[in-house]
Amino acid sequence: MNYELREMLPSDTAKVLEIFQQGIDGGIATFDTAVPNGEAWNMEYFNDCRWVLENENNEVVGWCALRPVSKKECFKGVAEAVIYFDNEYQGRGLGSVLLKKMILDSEDHGFWTLQANVFPENEASIKFHQKNGFRNVGTRKKIAKLNGVWKDLIMYERRSEIIS
């Protein structure tokens, strides 16, 4: 099957949010319990470094975007890397295509560190981040509750080798 990587467009919002809902429904990808509206989602992420992967039918099957980790000026080059795939397309190695493009694009936009927060039970995401050059920087124990249950988060980060 052929896939096309392209910049995310405003017309992709409905499919992006549909895929995000699948992530919420899976219970191991996010603390979010409801999908925001398109405007709220758009405000949460940087306008740059947004990409989608389309299948041969021009349907968005995955997306990635960066969101700020802090509003402080000193952290302007640090972002959380977020990647989601339609359930039918998970486990096919496609995430690396999106992540590699996002890494290159993020460096072009001056980001020196990408981070990811992963639930310990999300073994596929842990392997994915490790395979793609993210290092484990620690576990935050019982950092927040999801549906009334305390959850840990494993923090991963990738430091750019070209931005100093």
Image (spheres, rainbow, N blue to C red):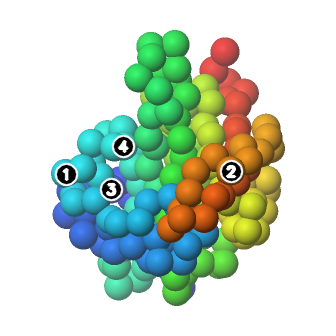
Q: Amino acid at mark 1?
A: Glu
- Give how far apart the Cα atoms at labels 2 and 1 are: 30 Å
Is the Cβ of the residue at disc 2 closer than 8 Å to that at disc 4? no
Q: Nearer the viewer, residue 158 or 153?
A: 153
**122 vs 91: above or below:** above
Look at mark 2 in the image and give the residue it sits on.
142
Q: In front: mark 3 or mark 4?
A: 4
- Nearest the viewer among 58 and 145 is 145
Give the vertical position of 107 relative to 151 (above or below).
above
Q: Residues within 10 Å of mark 4 (few under 14, many from 20)?
A: some
The disc, 1 or 3, on the residue closer to the chain's N-terminal end is 3
Disc 4 target residue: 45
Residue 118: x percent and y percent?
Answer: 66, 55
**Residue type indicated by callout 2:** Lys
- Residue at the spot 52% in from the left edge and 13% down from the top edge: 74
- Work out how far the residue at label 2 is from the one at label 4, CA to CA, in angstroms: 25 Å
* Mark closer to the chain start, 3 or 4: 3
Circle 2 crowding by C-alpha within 10 Å: few under 14, some 14–19, many from 20: few
Q: Which residue is mark 3?
A: 8
- Could you tell me residue 84's position as x and y percent? 50, 65
Foreground: disc 2 or disc 1: 2
Query: Dot 1 corresponds to which residue?
Result: 39
